[in-house]
Amino acid sequence: MVSAVFHSPRDAAASPAPLPSTAATAQPATRPAALAATTQPEAPAPKRTRPPFDGRGLALRVLPPVISVALLIGLWALATMKGGAFPTPAATFDAAVQLFSDPFYRKGPNDQGIGWNILNSLSRVGMGFGLAALVGIPLGFIIGRFEFANRMVSPLIALLKPVSPLAWLPIGLLAFKSANPAAIWTIFICSIWPMVVNTAVGVQRVPTDYLNVARVLRLSEWKVITRILLPAVLPYVLTGVRLSVGTAWLVIVAAEMLTGGVGIGFWVWDEWNNLNVAHILIAIFVIGTVGLLLEWALIAIAKHFTFEED
């Protein structure tokens, strides 16, 4: 006997609808982060790969200067093939090897190795250049910061800047009665102008918004200089320093030729009096190398303190 149970439509409407059979077994869509972290394996860290070797870039950096030096030596060798007073590259190289085998010998006050001459010239340049920086950089800040000082000093700078540095050498000899301080004075007077002008231009190009904020905050003049002006003007100052040190190294050779004593300039003039042209050529290469090293050092410092926006 089969029994059937019938429900009326009212009973069906009153009773809740049964849940689907899959609802009881369905997994939640998301899992806790801790559980996911324990169940999912960690991705392996990417291996650091070295950048590929840029042979073409290296060749573009190395080959041009090598080719230029080789071309210079080749033209030099062709010009001296038939002999004459001008030495060949081979003879100059042999003289350089002999000269630098003992660069720091001393045989008297006016007979010293080329190393001592270079160091004496660098010491004069350092003293004159340092004094110029101590005077020129603060003077540039004052000229760029205050309009009255700018109008007062600018005509003097415009008048004295074009004067040849060697024209100041007799003034130094007259004032100091000695060759060494006169050479330092000449370095000082030729080094000061680039630092003054570049520092003043840098101060004048500082955005006025920075200075307006300083006025609102009622910052003292010292804080304005050290916290606002100096960071903004530093690239201009370093540019002036680069120009000044190049000019100073250029002038010291000529100043030492006229004043005598110990120095690379006096050494060049003394070798000319001895008609030793090979040593003069060596001195030219030495002067250029030292100037190039000074330029590279200042460029590296300028890049370190210069911040460029991407």
Image (cartoon, grey):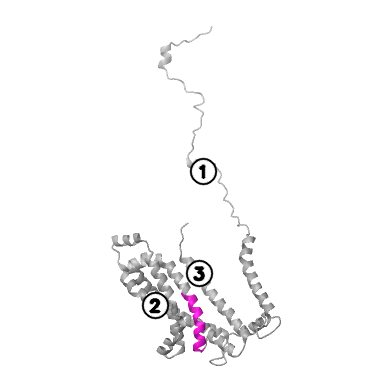
Question: What residue type is disc 2 on?
Answer: Leu
Indicate the position of residue 206 as horizontal and vertical percent values: 38, 63
Kind of element beneath mark 1 = helix
Question: What residue type is disc 1 on?
Answer: Ala
Q: Which mark is residue 299?
A: 3
Specify the farthest residue to the right.
82
Q: Is residue 155 visible?
A: yes
Neighbor class of circle 2 (other Cα within 10 Å; few <14, some 14-19, many 20+) is few
Q: Gap in Å between the C-alphas at discs 1 and 2?
A: 77 Å
Residue assigned mark 2: 159
Neighbor class of circle 3 (other Cα within 10 Å; few <14, some 14-19, many 20+) is some
Magenta segment: does it hold 269? Answer: no
Q: Nearer the viewer, mark 2 or mark 3?
A: 2
- Compared with 116, 240 (above or below) is above
Residue assigned mark 1: 37
Predominant SS of the magenta segment: helix
Q: From the viewer's side, name the closer residue of 283 and 296.
A: 283
Q: Which residues are magenta?
A: 244-261
Q: Residue at x 33, y 66 (%)?
A: 224
**Picture quarter containing residue 289?**
bottom right
Indicate the position of residue 81 as horizontal and vertical percent values: 71, 80
Q: From the viewer's side, name the closer residue of 57 and 217.
A: 57
Question: What residue type is disc 3 on?
Answer: Ile
Kind of element beneath mark 2 = helix
Indicate the position of residue 100 as horizontal and vertical percent values: 61, 83
